[in-house]
Image: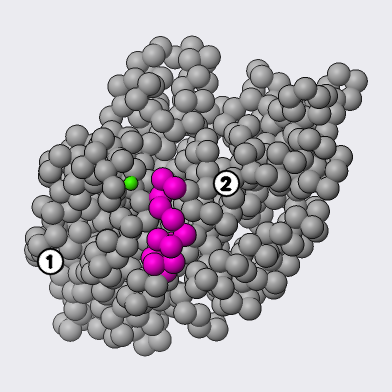
């Protein structure tokens, strides 16, 4: 496989609004990121992905962009951004931004001009349609609820939005629009940006002409998943984008791709694929129902293991997944994948080791490295996230009581990940000296960076060691390029695999249960086998096997 600069890196996602506030307005900002670059350096991060900081009316927390060439004043200025790029460069940290080009904001000048003349030049940047025989062009359900069609005020036109109505979809079929996007991408890459995370990218290809699909809920609408499954030809756009802008700059690109069809993985993430990597969302999707969150089921450790291994098998010999346990759209990984009794420091390190050592590019979401957990929301009024608000209504319509509906929201809300980073035990977790835009998780007194930084046994120190191991020249080749070979798959509660490199073999094994378990490894372990990392003081092994204590994770070199 051709080696690329990003293969051996560890990536870190920053949600700027909740990272660090320097001007006391309660909103994290770019100067705040600059101030924390040394922290990221110390952690060992090589790539930082910033969630959007562009000009935005903030209907969907910056995923609705009103100008791709401006920084929103709440985050700072373009000078701050330039300074961030420069300071990051000095520290050998590559900065990647979010590329939100399936849609823009309804406050983007393109859309404003388009509404004035839906049949004109800018009208063709979007999708405008009229009703036919009194019916909307299609019965698709927006991701945030309701029809994807919204009337243009004072006319009989409707525009398409697969997300919020303040996020009109851009018409990728129009070559002029595509040119505008490539121009913009180039402008950022010329500034020294290292690449992009491609937001909702799979939505850019719609099955046309618009038509109805079988409805899957009483609202008569149809889930976008089913709609997109019927679309073909996205490759034409993605290949063009790759060749025009990513390739010439050797840019890193990671796609938010939920539903690559069977046999398409190589197109998306192969050596010659559209992207450097795509996120592995198999565990994220596991248990989710098209009926909504209330009908969904949280994956068990067994599900988790099965999903990880399935993804690994599928990608082997093709390319890289970007591996995550959480992001800004998900609950905290430790609160989601770990059973209640396992949500201890030891359990958090277990989950960390198991996902981090898989083949792929590990992404850490801000706060994950200190073991931040879900927040408890008591009323929907405390919640900011638009998808939680919609799902709350879905719950209530399905007949759930307010309390039951809040239980559901507390399982899945996107706001769990969006609470401010817990820097210290000081007021507002040291995130701001003002009033935080979203309430800080009250557990910040115990879970915070200050309390962990100098403690060699903390979750933070464990993440640091994991990253250092990935960087260690003695093991890097195997950890980055070695095959994943699952073992003991049938053993409930145990997740274990080898990383098999050239003449080197690393065992990663973890026990999700609370009691000690033995795994037989006769022939794999020798007297010289070496523990590279463990979340428990003692590692009990001999030449025939390994005894894992409750919630223990072990990484060892088999010699
Ligand atoms: C992606 C983002 C999410 C956003 C949506 C619309 O899924 O991760 O936060 O709401 O796209 O842009
Ligand atoms: Ca601020």
Among the two numbered marks 2 and 1 on one chain, the one whose residue lies closer to the N terminus: 2
> Is 414 on the left or on the right of 65, as rendered?
left
Residue 482 in percent (x, y) is at 42, 77
Residue 227 appears in view: no
Name the image quarter holding the N terminus.
Answer: bottom right
Name the image quarter holding the C terminus.
Answer: bottom left
* Magenta span includes 75: yes
Residue 160 in percent (x, y) is at 72, 36
Q: Is residue 426 above or below residue 475?
A: above
Residue 179 appears in view: yes
Report the predominant secondary structure element of the magenta stretch: helix
53, 514: nearer the viewer: 53
- Point out the stretch of residues depicted in magenta: 73-85
Q: Secondary structure at mark 1?
A: strand
Q: Is residue 538 above or below residue 157?
A: below
Q: Residue at x 34, y 84 (%)?
A: 504
Res 527 quadrant in image: bottom left
Q: Which residue is mark 1?
A: 540
How many neighbours does mark 1 have within 10 angstroms: few (below 14), some (14-19), or many (20 or more)?
A: few
Q: Secondary structure at mark 2?
A: loop
The dot on residue 65 is 2
Q: Residue at x 63, y 52 (%)?
A: 101
| Cα separation between marks 2 and 1 | 54 Å
Q: Is residue 417 above or below residue 310?
A: above
Of badges 2 and 1, the one in the foreground is: 2
443, 86: nearer the viewer: 86
């Amino acid at each position: 496989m051709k080696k690329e600069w990003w293969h051996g890196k560890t990536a870190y996602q920053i949600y700027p609004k909740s990272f660090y506030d320097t001007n006391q307005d309660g909103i994290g900002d770019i100067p705040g990121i600059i101030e924390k670059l040394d922290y990221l350096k110390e952690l060992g991060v090589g790539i930082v992905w910033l969630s959007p900081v562009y000009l935005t009316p903030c209907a969907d927390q910056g995923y609705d962009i009103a100008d791709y060439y401006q920084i929103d004043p709440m985050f700072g200025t373009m000078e701050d951004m330039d300074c961030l790029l420069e300071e990051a460069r000095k520290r050998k940290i590559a900065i990647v931004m979010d590329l939100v080009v399936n849609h823009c904001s309804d406050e983007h000048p393109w859309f404003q001009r388009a509404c004035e003349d839906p049949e004109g030049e800018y009208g063709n940047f979007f999708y405008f349609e009229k009703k036919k025989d009194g019916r909307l062009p299609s019965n698709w359900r927006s991701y945030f609820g309701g029809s994807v069609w919204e009337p243009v005020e004072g006319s009989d036109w409707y525009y398409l939005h697969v997300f919020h109505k303040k996020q009109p979809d851009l018409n990728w079929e129009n070559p002029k629009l595509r040119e505008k996007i490539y121009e913009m991408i180039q402008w950022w890459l010329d500034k020294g940006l290292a690449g992009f995370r491609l937001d909702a990218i799979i939505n850019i290809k719609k099955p046309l002409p618009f038509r109805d699909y079988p409805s899957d809920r009483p609202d008569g609408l149809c889930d976008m998943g089913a709609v997109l499954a019927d679309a073909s030809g996205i490759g034409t756009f993605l290949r063009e984008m790759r060749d025009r802008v990513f390739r010439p700059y050797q840019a890193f690109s990671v796609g938010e791709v939920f539903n690559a069809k069977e046999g398409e993985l190589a197109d998306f993430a192969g050596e010659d694929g559209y992207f450097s990597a795509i996120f592995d969302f198999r565990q994220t999707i596991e248990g989710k129902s098209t009926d909504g969150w209330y009908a969904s089921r949280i994956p068990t450790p067994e599900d988790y293991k099965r999903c990880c291994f399935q993804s690994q098998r599928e990608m082997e010999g093709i390319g890289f997944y970007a591996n995550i346990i959480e992001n800004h759209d998900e609950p905290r990984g430790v609160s989601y994948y770990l059973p209640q009794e396992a949500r201890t420091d030891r359990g958090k390190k277990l989950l960390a080791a198991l996902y981090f050592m898989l083949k792929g590019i590990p992404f850490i979401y801000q706060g994950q490295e200190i073991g931040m957990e879900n927040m408890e929301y008591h009323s929907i009024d405390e919640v900011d996230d638009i998808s939680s608000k919609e799902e709350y209504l879905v719950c209530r319509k399905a007949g759930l009581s307010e309390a039951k509906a809040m239980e559901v929201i507390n399982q899945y809300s996107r706001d769990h990940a969006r609470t401010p980073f817990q820097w210290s035990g000081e007021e507002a977790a040291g995130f701001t000296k003002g009033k935080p835009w979203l309430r800080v998780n009250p557990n910040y007194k115990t879970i915070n960076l200050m309390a962990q930084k100098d403690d060699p046994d903390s979750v933070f120190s464990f993440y640091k060691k994991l990253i250092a191991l990935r960087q260690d020249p003695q093991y890097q080749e195997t950890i980055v390029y070695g095959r994943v070979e699952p073992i003991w798959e049938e053993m409930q509660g145990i997740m274990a695999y080898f990383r098999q490199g050239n003449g080197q073999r690393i065992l990663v094994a973890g026990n999700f249960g609370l009691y000690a378990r033995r795994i037989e490894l006769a022939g794999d372990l020798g007297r010289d086998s070496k523990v590279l990392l463990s979340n428990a003081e003692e590692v009990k092994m001999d030449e025939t096997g390994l005894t894992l204590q409750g919630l223990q994770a072990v990484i060892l070199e088999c010699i």
